[in-house]
């Protein structure tokens, strides 16, 4: 029973990491119709920057958090401005290919510039174990679940209440009409990229604290695809839920069946979902008009 | 210079070429290719062999991505399946290599039906994700079934012996690959001008319109998947023979990106573009090596120790630059040049 609870709780933690990255996919997809294949790589780069900061400030959590959030926003804006903005209005194949190109560049650049070795990242007491009624979790694992709920709440309030959030929803619903109403699409895209980078950056940094920092961190992005698709690519809160489902399923498969199957459990789920409900559990069914 | 194209029958229209000049160029090109082992050194020969293998893979992907408009990130998966089908059938079971090649095409073809069926309802983004997922699933399956595939230690592949002739020397391997390359080009040229090719183009250009014209979308999409993965599987088998060793590590995911980059560099949908792109992308790291050697041994050793990463950055930059500045690729550049040459000194 403890084993089962352990699997569930650590699955929840890793699921929250996937959920945060899946939300990043969803927010960019919702506002611009583009899937950012480089999201996991961006999370990795932000985690590396956070690590470089943490080494210099002896793991002061506030400086690390402020530094990495600032970097995440700056990084996302630069990438969006240089690589993505000029591709607006191009065919979807070209846009996807640009993000795929970015992902290979980031992945290789980290290994070239830094190194390919795993590092331990120590920030405050992020590594410490906490006993929650028999289940032992690391502080960073609990923090990532907290972050996910915070992100869900923030997104919900943002899209319901704020002027900008309403504009974003308008762009998602009908880009041409939104433009006619005076919505600046460029700014919407910038905001989406910034928010996505902060969320996936938080996921990357907390994952690095709880487990380890290595160039293999970009795999989180690949693992988050099933989460986003399970929840529905256009549903931000659905993606978060999808992340948790995928994380727990993966851990249960790894714990009870085989560790090799754990790695591909998410991908098998994707293919099954796409066969049954291609628009995801919470996504909007697309009705095409001829 | 002819002033226009005048065709009176459909047979004339679908001829591969009716220009004597073009035929002459093809003959010269073939002569250069077939005499290449006589004047190329060992290194150059293996580079050209690798270019041809890559070109076969790109031609295969072009059928799916360039013609039918289905984005695939599963190139690596089909190559792995082809390479393992060949290695297991010829090395473990002792089948003759020709049967091995047939199996190297058929296994990925069957797998592509499995991957293709869930993708029928999907377009663009989702298809890219399912094919990406499939490439990870295939890698893990290969590692899981280690009784058959030898797991992570891989299978050693001997050079094939076909009809009593052993393809042991590098020159003979070159001819084998060249033979397959010419076959792949002929196959796809003839596919392009047939009913099949026209159906693919129709699906790419407007799937609803194609459907109204009586094209069964599901059947033709699966068919595109099958033809494409057959060719890619053969490419995988040849790559395995070229490396003389088949492991999962020998087929990194970067190969899928490389194949898409080749199509973009060459010009999506064009066979000549796929070949040109392959030559460009395989040759580029060598060119880069020469440039690096000017900067001294330290920079050159960087290229040697982290070749995979340098290639990754290079492919990424090339994809982005071509999409931004020359979306029609090298073939687009070529037709621009031709146009400029014809109408010079006028601008249009």
Image (cartoon, helix red, strand yellow):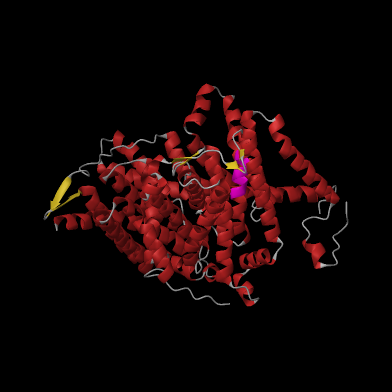
Judged left or right of residue A144, residue B108 is right
- The reply to whether residue A89 is in sight is no
Q: What stretch is highlighted in magenta?
A: B50-57
Q: Quadrant of the N terminus of chain A?
A: bottom left
- Depth check: A211 or A84 in front? A211
Judged left or right of residue B107, residue A70 is left
- Depth check: B253 or B92 in front? B92
Which residue is painted at 68% across and 33% down in the image? B37
Secondary structure character of the magenta stretch overall? helix
Which residue is painted at 31% across and 64% down in the image? A241
Q: In which quarter of the image is residue B219?
A: bottom right
Judged left or right of residue B43, residue A27 is left
- Depth check: B151 or A51 in front? B151
Q: Which residue lies furthest to the front in this view?
A: B164
- The reply to whether residue B74 is in sight is yes
Residue A178 higher or lower than B3, as above or below: below
Report x, y in % for residue A91. 59, 60
């Amino acid at each position: 029973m403890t084993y089962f609870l352990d699997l569930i709780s650590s699955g929840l933690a890793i699921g929250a990491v996937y959920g945060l990255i899946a939300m990043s996919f969803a927010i960019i997809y919702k506002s611009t119709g583009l899937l950012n294949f480089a999201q996991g790589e961006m999370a990795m780069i932000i985690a590396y920057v956070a690590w470089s900061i943490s080494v210099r400030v002896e793991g002061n959590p506030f400086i690390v958090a402020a530094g990495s959030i600032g970097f995440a926003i700056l990084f996302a804006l630069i990438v969006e401005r240089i690589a993505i903005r000029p591709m607006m209005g191009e065919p979807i194949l070209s846009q996807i290919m640009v993000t795929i190109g970015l992902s290979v560049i980031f992945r290789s650049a980290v290994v070239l510039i830094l190194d390919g070795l795993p590092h331990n990242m120590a920030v405050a007491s992020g590594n410490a174990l906490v006993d929650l009624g028999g289940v032992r979790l690391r502080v960073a694992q609990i923090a990532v679940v907290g972050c996910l709920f915070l992100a869900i709440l923030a997104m919900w309030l943002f899209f319901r209440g704020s002027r900008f959030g309403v504009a974003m929803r308008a762009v998602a619903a009908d880009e041409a009409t939104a433009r006619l109403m005076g919505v600046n699409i460029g700014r919407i895209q910038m905001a989406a990229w910034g928010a996505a980078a902060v969320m996936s950056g938080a996921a990357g940094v907390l994952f690095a604290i709880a487990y380890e920092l290595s160039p293999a961190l970009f795999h989180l992005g690949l693992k988050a695809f099933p989460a986003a698709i399970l929840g529905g690519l256009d549903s931000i809160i659905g993606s978060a839920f999808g992340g948790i489902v995928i994380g727990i399923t993966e851990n249960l498969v790894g714990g009870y069946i085989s560790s090799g199957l754990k790695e591909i459990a998410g991908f098998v789920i994707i293919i099954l979902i796409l066969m049954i409900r291609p628009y995801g559990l919470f996504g909007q069914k697309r009705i095409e008009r001829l | 210079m002819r002033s226009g194209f005048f065709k009176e029958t459909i047979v004339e229209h679908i001829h591969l070429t009716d220009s004597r000049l073009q035929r002459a160029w093809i003959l010269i090109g073939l002569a250069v290719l077939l005499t290449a082992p006589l004047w190329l050194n060992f290194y150059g020969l293996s580079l050209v062999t690798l270019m041809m293998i890559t070109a076969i893979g790109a031609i295969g992907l072009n059928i799916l991505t360039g013609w039918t408009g289905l984005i695939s990130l599963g190139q690596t998966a089909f190559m792995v399946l082809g390479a393992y089908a060949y290695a297991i059938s010829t090395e473990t079971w002792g089948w003759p290599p020709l049967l091995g090649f047939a199996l190297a095409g058929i296994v990925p073809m069957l797998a592509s039906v499995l991957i293709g069926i869930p993708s029928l309802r999907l377009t663009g983004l989702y298809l890219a994700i399912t094919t990406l997922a499939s490439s990870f699933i295939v890698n893990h399956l290969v590692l899981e079934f280690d009784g058959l595939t030898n797991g992570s230690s891989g299978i050693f592949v001997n050079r094939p012996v076909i009809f009593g002739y052993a393809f042991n020397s590098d020159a003979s391997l070159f001819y084998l690959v060249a033979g397959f390359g010419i076959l792949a080009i002929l196959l796809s040229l003839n596919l392009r001008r047939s009913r099949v090719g026209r159906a693919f183009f129709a699906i790419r250009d407007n799937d609803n319109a194609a459907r109204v014209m009586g094209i069964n979308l599901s059947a033709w999409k699966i068919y595109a998947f099958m033809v494409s993965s057959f060719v890619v599987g053969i490419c995988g088998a040849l790559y395995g023979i070229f490396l003389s060793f088949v492991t999962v590590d020998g087929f990194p995911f970067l190969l899928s990106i490389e194949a898409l980059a080749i199509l973009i560099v060459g010009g999506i949908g064009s066979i000549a573009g796929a070949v040109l792109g392959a030559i460009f992308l395989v040759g580029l790291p060598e060119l880069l090596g020469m440039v690096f050697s000017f900067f001294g041994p330290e920079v050159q050793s960087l290229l040697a120790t982290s070749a995979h990463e340098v290639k990754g950055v290079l492919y990424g930059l090339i994809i982005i630059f071509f999409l931004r500045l020359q979306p029609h690729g090298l073939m687009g550049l070529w037709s621009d040049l031709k146009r400029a040459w014809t109408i010079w000194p006028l601008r249009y």
